[in-house]
Image: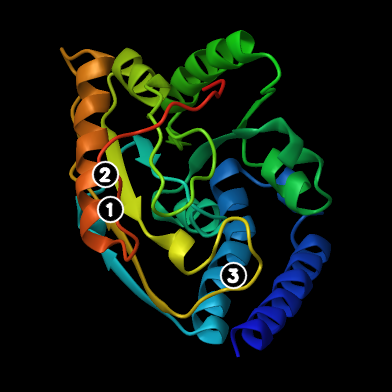
């Protein structure tokens, strides 16, 4: 049953991308940034609803009322593709830190380019880190929120890696709050397998962490502690107590 559901889901997934590519991409470059986000995020809204309907997923969203009115740095754990879609809708307009290769995907990557992402070349770690810090601060100051996955890559449920502090550094330099986010999306939408699984998908938004007068290390430690505590609560797969190192540019 899960295989059939997943096949139906991907048929809708591909068709929605093609339709949105034809209807939304041509006018998008001529729209103001806010309107561009609203238009292109219609695809995201569809995918989130389609996934719930076809794959038997029950959403439980918590803490959205905690989001600040202005721009912030969103720090989320990263388990699957689902959160890359949903978190674009959480506090728009939001700029995502991502790997540069994604921009070359037809239709999907073309749309990403129009949303002012921070696209990194992972083969050049030092340059990537400088790019994150420079462009991230500029995006915040222009009114965009910034989404960063501090684990640096997708991490399977039940695995824990060390968090990178670049998001906290950006927030401290710009004087903007950090908003931690925890979810168990990888248990429903596996990061490295195409078959989707029914059940409860929980996402919780944490209270904003103020950065004024604080170090990036302090802010990152607080954000990581909150995310890991929530993951231990909402995850079906037990969380390890310690993290393993992983190499990543940012």
- Give whichever of discs 3 and 1 has the lower sequence position: 3
User: Residue tagged by mark 3?
Assistant: 47
Residue at 49% across, 26% down: 139
CB within 8 Å, label 2 to label 1 = yes
Residue at disc 1, secondary structure: helix
Foreground of the two, 99 or 64: 99
Residue 66, given in percent of the width and then of the height, sits at 20, 50
Residue at disc 3, secondary structure: helix
Residue 224, given in percent of the width and then of the height, sits at 27, 35
Q: Quadrant of residue 135?
A: top right
Kindly report which numbered mark, 3 or 1, lies closer to the viewer in this rendering. 1
Foreground of the two, 146 or 5: 5
Residue 110, given in percent of the width and then of the height, sits at 77, 45
Q: Quadrant of the N terminus?
A: bottom right
Question: Vertical placement of 119 versus 214: above or below?
Answer: below
- Give whichever of discs 3 and 2 has the lower sequence position: 3
Question: Vertical placement of 125 versus 105: above or below?
Answer: above
User: Residue tagged by mark 1?
Assistant: 231
Q: Residues within 10 Å of mark 3 (few under 14, many from 20)?
A: many
Q: Is residue 162 visible?
A: yes
Foreground of the two, 4 or 173: 4
Question: Vertical placement of 74 versus 42: above or below?
Answer: above
Residue at disc 2, secondary structure: helix
Residue 88, given in percent of the width and then of the height, sits at 50, 51
User: Residue tagged by mark 2?
Assistant: 227
In this rendering, would 28 be left or right of 214? right
Residue at 45% across, 48% down: 92
């Amino acid at each position: 049953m899960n295989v059939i559901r997943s096949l139906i889901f991907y048929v809708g997934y591909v068709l929605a991308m093609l339709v949105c590519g034809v209807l939304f991409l041509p006018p998008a470059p001529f729209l103001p940034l806010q309107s561009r986000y609203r238009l292109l995020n219609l695809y995201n809204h569809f995918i989130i609803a389609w996934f719930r309907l076809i794959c038997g997923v029950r959403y439980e969203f918590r803490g959205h009322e905690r989001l600040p009115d202005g721009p912030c740095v969103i720090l989320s754990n990263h388990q699957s593709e689902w959160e890359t879609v949903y978190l674009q809708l959480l506090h728009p307009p939001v700029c995502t830190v991502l790997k540069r290769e994604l921009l070359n995907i037809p239709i999907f990557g073309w749309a990403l380019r129009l949303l002012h992402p921070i696209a990194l070349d992972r083969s050049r770690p030092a340059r990537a880190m400088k790019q994150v810090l420079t462009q991230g601060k500029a995006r915040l100051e222009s009114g965009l929120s910034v989404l960063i996955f501090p684990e640096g890559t997708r991490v399977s449920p039940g695995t824990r890696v060390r968090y990178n502090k670049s998001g906290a550094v950006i927030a401290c330099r710009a004087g903007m709050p950090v908003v931690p986010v925890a979810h168990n999306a990888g248990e429903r939408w596996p990061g490295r397998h195409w078959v989707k699984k029914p059940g409860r998908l929980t996402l919780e938004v944490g209270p904003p962490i103020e950065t004024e007068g604080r170090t990036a290390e302090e802010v990152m430690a607080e954000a990581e502690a909150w995310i890991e505590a929530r993951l231990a609560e909402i995850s079906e797969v037990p969380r390890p107590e310690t993290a393993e190192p992983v190499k990543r540019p940012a």
